[in-house]
Image (cartoon, rainbow, N blue to C red):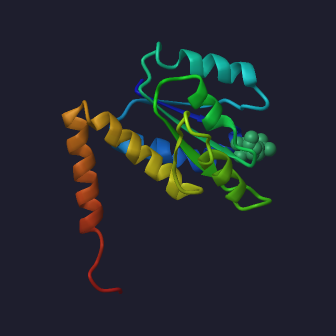
Amino acid sequence: MDVGIIMGSQSDWETMRHAASILEELGVAYEAKVVSAHRTPQRLYDYATGAKARGLKVLIAGAGGAAHLPGMAAAMTPLPVLGVPVESKALSGLDSLLSIAQMPGGIPVGTLAIGKAGAINAGLLAAAILGLADPALAGRLEAWRSAQTDSVAESPE
Ligand code: RP5
């Protein structure tokens, strides 16, 4: 398993499944787990501290509201952590975005856009990171991007 996708709640899966879909398309092995910083702190501790030893290489962490999951995970693992701000009901994800992006200097979280776009891009970014040491994967990612380019019509229909 190369990528660990974690999310604060089952309700985040609707967003985070888009990261999983991209990884599947690109043939990247991943696992997806519900790990809440607030409701299951011991599960977060165990997951983050054990992630590298289990062979994971990149973590994608999605959460909404007071979104501490990505930052807390980053504090407990040397692996790169990509944060996805899930769109919250009260503040449309602005709270999630600021919670994830505004890390103090020293513990980085690579923060993506709010919602589905962020989840898709987290999957693509994880693939790009892994592609640095996996030429076949880098090739698949390049092909994916070329196909996207080819799909854009010059004129609107
Ligand atoms: C956060 O609270 C989760 O990441 C989720 O985005 C949000 C709402 O969670 P639920 O009340 O739907 O479980 O911890």
Q: Residue at x 27, y 37 (%)?
A: 131
- In this view, the residue in front, 54 or 24, is 54
Left or right: 43 with respect to 117? right
| Quadrant placement of the C terminus | bottom left
Q: Residue at x 56, y 34 (%)?
A: 107
The percent coordinates of residue 4 (x first, y second) are: 50, 30
The percent coordinates of residue 109 (x first, y second) are: 54, 40
- Ligand 1 occupies quarter: top right
Q: Please say whether residue 7 is visible from this viewpoint.
A: no
- In the displayed structure, would residue 136 be above or below residue 84? above
The percent coordinates of residue 54 (x first, y second) are: 47, 14
Single out the residue that lies furthest toward the front: 105
Q: Residue at x 40, y 40 (%)?
A: 126
Q: Please say whether residue 91 is visible from this viewpoint.
A: yes
Residue 155 falls in image quadrant? bottom left
Left or right: 68 with respect to 22? right
| Quadrant placement of the N terminus | top left
Residue 76 falls in image quadrant? top right
- In the displayed structure, would residue 14 be above or below residue 33? below
Single out the residue that lies furthest toward the top: 53
